[in-house]
Image (tube, grey):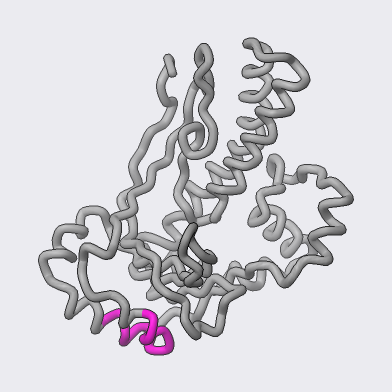
């Protein structure tokens, strides 16, 4: 797309990532994470099954600076696995499936703000339009909302330039605050800033118990926050269906380990 990016910055921290069999993992409705300040992060997220494979799986991730990827591989699996088991012994049976460095993908993410989301018949959506770090867990939410907004814009304005301009204007107004929050919050979860990590541990919990705090956090994590104080309207039928659905996936941060 002509015009390029107003901002395109690769984050210094990434992650090692793979899928592991869930087997008898007891937390199949929860994201479980373990932190050492913000320098180390281990996560296990239930992600269901794959096409043609009925094995329930967990998304496993280990936070690592991009500059340390080659050093990690050069050191071999043994010292890393020893550290992994020591930090989270309760998940040791899951980690038994980690045997070779080739199992793990190197995840790198970036902060990108595009000047223009469309050109001719080409339209950007999802991470291509608004890449951000994964700390808020909003990649899929934002992509689905992009698709919905593009559909509505085409239905309202037809297939020309006005539809694409309306789509871009609507989605940029929503996603901009998420990009800012993601940019600001990332050092609390992936960095060598121990004081920031300590503030995270001491402040985020109480903030969620303040009047209005829990509702605000839930709107952010559900992708329905609009601007600093607003909220996207939800269809009443969707709210009713959600209330009748099974227990949703919950985010749980396990205590940091010294």
Q: Position of residue 89 (x, y in %)?
A: 38, 88
Q: Residue at x 42, y 57 (%)?
A: 187
Which residue is situated farthest in the left direction here? 74
Q: Residue at x 57, y 50 (%)?
A: 138
Q: Is residue 119 above or below residue 56?
A: above
Query: In front here: 63 or 249?
Result: 249
Which residue is situated farthest in the front direction here? 52
* Residue 77 inside the magenta-drawn segment: no
Identify the image quadrant of residue 2.
top left
Query: In front here: 87 or 123?
Result: 123
Q: Is residue 250 above or below residue 123?
A: below
Q: Position of residue 203 (x, y in %)?
A: 58, 69
Q: Is residue 169 above or below residue 95?
A: above
Left or right: 39 in relation to 161: left
- Whether residue 52 is visible, yes or no, is yes
Identify the image quadrant of residue 230.
top right
Q: Position of residue 100 (x, y in %)?
A: 21, 70
Q: Quadrant of the C terminus?
A: bottom left
- Whether residue 198 is visible, yes or no, is no
Q: Which residues are magenta?
A: 83-94
Query: In front here: 176 or 109?
Result: 109
Q: Residue at x 71, y 42 (%)?
A: 226
């Amino acid at each position: 797309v002509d015009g390029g990016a107003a901002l395109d910055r690769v984050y210094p921290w990434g992650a090692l990532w793979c899928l592991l069999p869930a087997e008898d993992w007891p937390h199949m409705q929860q994201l479980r994470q373990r932190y050492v300040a913000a320098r180390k992060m281990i996560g296990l997220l239930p992600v269901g099954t794959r096409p043609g494979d009925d094995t329930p799986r967990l998304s496993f991730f280990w936070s690592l600076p991009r500059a340390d990827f080659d050093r990690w591989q050069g050191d071999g699996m043994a010292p890393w696995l020893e550290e992994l088991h020591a930090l989270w012994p309760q998940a040791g049976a899951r980690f038994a499936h980690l045997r070779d460095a080739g199992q793990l993908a190197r995840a790198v993410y970036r902060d990108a703000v595009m000047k223009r989301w469309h050109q001719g018949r080409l339209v950007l959506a999802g991470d291509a339009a608004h890449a951000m770090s994964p700390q808020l867990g909003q990649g899929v939410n934002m992509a689905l909302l992009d698709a919905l907004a593009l559909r509505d814009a085409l239905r309202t304005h037809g297939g020309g330039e006005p539809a694409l301009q309306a789509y871009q204007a609507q989605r940029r107004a929503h996603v901009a605050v998420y990009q800012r929050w993601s940019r600001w919050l990332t050092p609390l979860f992936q960095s060598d800033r121990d004081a920031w990590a300590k503030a995270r541990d001491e402040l985020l919990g109480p903030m969620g118990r303040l009047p209005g705090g829990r509702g605000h956090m839930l709107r952010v994590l559900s992708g329905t926050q609009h601007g600093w104080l607003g909220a996207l309207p939800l269809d009443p039928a969707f709210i009713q269906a959600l209330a009748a659905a099974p227990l949703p996936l919950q985010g749980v941060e396990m205590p940091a380990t010294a």
